[in-house]
Image (cartoon, grey):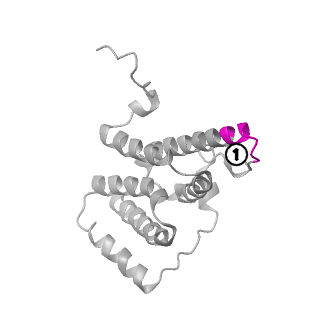
Amino acid sequence: YNRSEDAPEVDDELAEFSPQVRAMITQALIELGSIPMDELMVAKKQMSMQSATVPEEMRPMFSYLLKKLDERIQELSDSESEDDIEVSTEDANIDVIDAPIETFVTQPAAVLQLTPNQMAQANEFLINFENKTLGDLVQIYAALQGAIVAVPEDERPILEFVLARLAVQIAELEQ
């Protein structure tokens, strides 16, 4: 086939993923395009903390999203510096992708404190995942990982709890 001259460039790294994963990544990248710098930094920190719980089969996707998140942060930093706005890029220089997983495993995890209402919402959410196959759970996990940056701050603990429980359920099914 021949590509149109005005067609967007093909990202070879993205093309290696399955169509389903590409769709999830593409949706996450669309959301990244509209997130302000301060929220991108929060998303990067959250993804860095969650990197230890990512199932092995989802690590390439997770690494790709982290790379794109870094690129977006750098892009915003560059455009802001061009406008003579002082930007701290201290957090943007963290290279999570190349860091050994042991770095995250040895750090104590933050304890999630849910209110009874939040716990009820999380449990209601988790009920929907009962009797799902390993493949389905991995896809759900990946989609929720990508969506966490778009979740309102007050609802993030619920999703973080659900992600932690899903990670445990996936690990149990893999064994």
User: Which picture quadrant has residue 3?
Assistant: top left
Q: Which span of residues is magenta-colored?
A: 78-86
Give the residue drawn at x 72%, y 36%: 82
Q: Amino acid at mark 1?
A: Asn
* Residue situated furthest front in the rendering: 83
Q: Position of residue 134 (x, y in %)?
A: 29, 56
Can you say which quadrant of the picture contains the C terminus? bottom left
Q: Is residue 157 above or below residue 91?
A: below
Give the residue drawn at x 59%, y 71%: 110
Is residue 15 or residue 60 the one in the foreground?
15
Q: Is residue 81 magenta?
A: yes
Residue 100 shown left or right of residue 163 in the figure: right
Q: Position of residue 116 (x, y in %)?
A: 43, 86
Give the residue drawn at x 53%, y 41%: 68
Q: Position of residue 46 (x, y in %)?
A: 56, 59
Q: Is residue 32 magenta?
A: no
Q: How many marks?
A: 1
In this figure, which residue is indicated by the disc labeled 1? 93
User: Which picture quadrant has residue 74?
Assistant: top right
Is residue 87 or residue 89 the one in the foreground?
87
Give the residue drawn at x 33%, y 56%: 140
Give the secondary structure at mark 1.
helix
Is residue 32 or residue 158 the one in the foreground?
32
Is residue 92 or residue 102 the one in the foreground?
92
